[in-house]
């Protein structure tokens, strides 16, 4: 029966199309060289996870030969995979007993086998000496049965060897801890990290999927966009972006520009003076000085943190400066630089809009967020309806610092119903729009 099961797994694997699996690790530069954690968002599949900054993200292909595991605690980890020369294999033995580890080539021929009495612990083995190709690992005991695919891209061939190299207490199957070769030891960043070990975190992946990676180090957060094509190390360039309220913002580089990846929510100018919070509709529509409001005058912190606050144009033009130190309100020309880099106004909106969330109303046409800008539909407050609020979830309207006429200024619109970025110069300065800042 066991031979039949293995043969079925091999036939199933050969019948599918091979898909590359990738190992992604992380580093920091700029204001910090360490990475505390990484939010991983697969924008194509609308899936996400949070991993330690010293962890390795293992993207597991879904359109190729995938790992097939059976048993109650069915975790087996292989690192690196693909392997060059050698790799580490880790798994939980959930009870003491004889365990057999076998390796087969793609034709079903047994390449090697090891059999040992193992304790109820997490066990690590070293595999070396196999030629280039696709192999299938089978681990069997009375209580466990694991099967995994291993890819070797070794250019030399020697005698295949598998040997037991260590044990640790049984670990959570969501985060398999592997002993790595000297020189690849982890630091203290991340969750559950120990010196000399890393955690390999699996995430389902299909070739061509777009990932949004947000690295965090202390108060710094940087977004990095990636469509993986190989094993790589992502280096987050950490940049300070903190307003006078001590709000810390994520940032993203788009072309040659570095933008805030969130809407501004400060209630103070850079010098510490308060920006007026005007809730009365009539008073708002008659303003000729700087002011902010929350959409619908809400006090809900989740709404404020998500969409930021709305500001009239006079706030942007105040000499006390509302932008974080080292940042400024983008000019009309700088907005045009952004949209031109993203292919022009007719398509740039989709590349700027957040997808995979409930923040934008359907149909959110063209939204891919491939820029990492993560544009949100924060709605607006408009003068001609006597300071009323409108269109949260439908539109994101953003000020530029450039005046169009004495009572008007340039702005940009994102729309749920198309993929465009609309440019307008006739927005009255008393309107309340969202604000994004640009690095000096």
Image (spheres, rainbow, N blue to C red):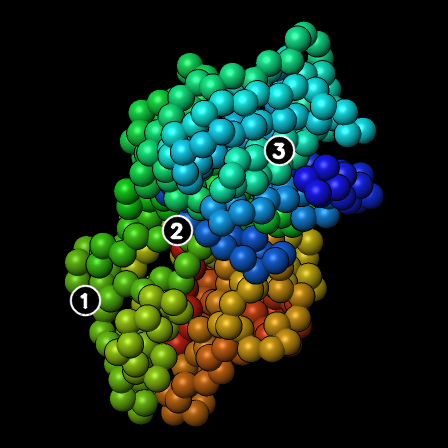
Label 3 belongs to which residue?
A: 138
The mark that comes first in sequence, 1 or 2, is: 2
Res 267 quadrant in image: bottom left
Which sits in the foreground, 108 or 285? 108
Q: Position of residue 70 (x, y in %)?
A: 58, 47
Image quadrant where one finds the C terminus = top left
Label 2 belongs to which residue?
A: 250
Q: Badge 3 local density, few (<14 within 10 Å), some, or many (20+)?
A: some
Q: How many marks?
A: 3
Q: CA distance from mark 1 to mark 3?
A: 65 Å
The mark that comes first in sequence, 2 or 3, is: 3
Residue at screen point 42% across, 49% down: 50
**Which mark identifies residue 254?**
none
Image quadrant where one finds the N terminus = top right
The mark that comes first in sequence, 1 or 3, is: 3
Res 81 quadrant in image: top right
Q: Nearer the viewer, mark 1 or mark 3?
A: 3
Q: Secondary structure at mark 3?
A: strand
Which sits in the foreground, 56 or 212? 56
Q: Badge 2 local density, few (<14 within 10 Å), some, or many (20+)?
A: many
Q: Secondary structure at mark 1?
A: loop
Q: Nearer the viewer, mark 1 or mark 2?
A: 2
Residue 340 sits above or below residue 431 on the image: above
Residue at screen point 80% across, 41% down: 11
Label 1 belongs to which residue?
A: 274
Q: CA distance from mark 2 to mark 3?
A: 44 Å
Question: From this viewpoint, is residue 345 visible?
Answer: no
Q: Position of residue 404 (x, y in %)?
A: 50, 69
Residue 419 sits above or below residue 337 on the image: below
Q: Position of residue 96 (x, y in %)?
A: 40, 33
């Amino acid at each position: 029966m066991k031979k039949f099961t293995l043969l079925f797994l091999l036939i199933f694997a050969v019948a599918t199309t091979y898909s590359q699996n990738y190992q992604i690790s992380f580093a920091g530069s700029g204001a910090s060289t360490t990475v505390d954690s990484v939010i991983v968002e697969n924008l194509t599949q609308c899936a996400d996870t949070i991993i330690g900054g010293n962890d390795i993200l293992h993207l597991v292909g879904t359109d190729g030969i995938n790992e097939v595991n059976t048993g109650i605690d069915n975790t087996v980890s292989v690192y690196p995979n693909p392997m060059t020369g050698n790799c580490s294999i880790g798994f939980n033995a959930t009870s003491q007993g004889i365990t057999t580890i076998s390796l087969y080539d793609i034709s079903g021929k047994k390449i090697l086998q090891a059999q040992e009495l193992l304790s109820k612990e997490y066990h690590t083995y070293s595999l070396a000496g196999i030629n280039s190709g696709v192999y299938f690992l089978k681990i069997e005991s009375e209580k466990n049965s694991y099967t995994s695919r291993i890819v070797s891209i070794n250019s030399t061939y020697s005698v295949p060897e598998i040997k037991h190299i260590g044990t640790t207490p049984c670990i959570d199957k969501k985060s398999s801890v592997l002993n790595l070769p000297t020189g690849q030891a982890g630091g203290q960043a991340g969750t559950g990290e120990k010196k000399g070990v890393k955690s390999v975190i699996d995430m389902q992946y299909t070739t061509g999927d777009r990932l949004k990676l947000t690295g965090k180090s202390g108060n710094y957060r940087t977004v990095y966009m990636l469509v993986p094509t190989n094993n790589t190390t992502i280096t987050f360039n950490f940049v300070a972006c903190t307003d006078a309220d001590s709000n810390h913002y994520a940032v993203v580089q788009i072309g040659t520009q570095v933008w805030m990846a969130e809407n501004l929510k400060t209630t103070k100018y850079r010098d510490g003076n308060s920006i007026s919070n005007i809730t009365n509709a009539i008073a708002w529509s008659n303003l000729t000085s700087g002011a902010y409001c929350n959409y619908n005058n809400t006090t809900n912190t989740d709404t404020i943190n998500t969409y930021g606050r709305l500001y009239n144009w006079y706030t942007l033009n105040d000499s006390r400066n509302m932008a974080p130190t080292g940042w400024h309100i983008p000019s009309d020309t700088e907005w045009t630089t952004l949209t031109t880099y993203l292919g022009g106004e007719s398509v740039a909106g989709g590349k700027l809009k957040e997808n995979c969330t409930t923040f934008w109303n359907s149909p959110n046409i063209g939204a891919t967020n491939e820029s990492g800008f993560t544009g949100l539909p924060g709605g607006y407050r408009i003068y001609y309806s006597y300071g009323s609020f409108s269109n949260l979830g439908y539109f994101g309207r953003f000020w530029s610092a450039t005046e169009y006429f004495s009572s008007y200024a340039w702005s940009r619109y994102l729309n749920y119903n198309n993929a465009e970025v609309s440019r307008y110069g006739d927005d009255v300065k008393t309107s309340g729009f969202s604000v994004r800042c640009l690095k000096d």
